[in-house]
Amino acid sequence: MSVLKHGELSEKVIRCAMNVHSVLGPGLLESAYNQCLCHELHINGISFEREKPLPVVYKDCRLDCGYRIDIMVEDKIIVELKSISELKEIHKAQLLSYMKLAGINKGLLLNFNVTHLRNGLESLVL
């Protein structure tokens, strides 16, 4: 596990995502971007967990409701991937809910179905 600060780590993850987007372009399935981003993170020495289970804790009861974090980077950043026509507020709300449930204060929402990835990027902090 690296000792990068949150900002530096976020920048590295975003660079990796931009590399994936520049090679693949828009229009593919989310699963393709997920696998390619994980490969890019790996070759850049960034540790991550793909499809990390996310239990819901409700009134001291831990429930496995089937939620999965797309990519958890170094137990510091949740990366939620989309390949949709446009990001909506509900997508941000979803990521914020995941962040709260996981106890993680940094999240990246990446929509790969855009001409330029910077237009499909949201960085969220709790």
Image: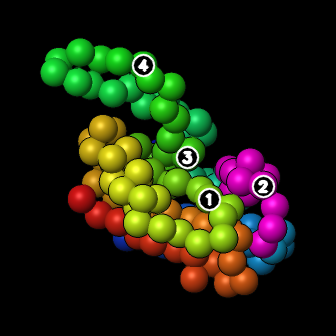
Magenta-highlighted stretch: main secondary structure? helix
**Residue flagged by tag 4: what amino acid is it?**
Asp
| Of the image marks 2 and 3, the number of the one nearer the N terminus | 2
Q: What's the distance in space between the residues labelled 3 and 1, CA to CA?
A: 12 Å
**Residue flagged by tag 3: what amino acid is it?**
Ile
Q: Give the range drawn in magenta.
A: 26-38
Describe the element under mark 3 as helix, strand or loop: strand
Q: What's the distance in space between the residues labelled 4 and 1, CA to CA?
A: 23 Å
Q: In this view, does 9 lie to the left or right of 26?
A: left
**Residue flagged by tag 1: what amino acid is it?**
Lys
* The C terminus sits in image quarter: bottom left
Q: Is residue 43 left or right of residue 106?
A: right
Instruction: Determine which residue is flagged by label 3.
Output: 71
Numbered badge on residue 64: 4
Is disc 1 surrounded by few (<14), some (14 to 19) or many (20+) residues within 10 Å? many
Residue 49 image position (x, y, % from top left): 56, 38
Reply yes or no: does residue 28 show up in magenta: yes
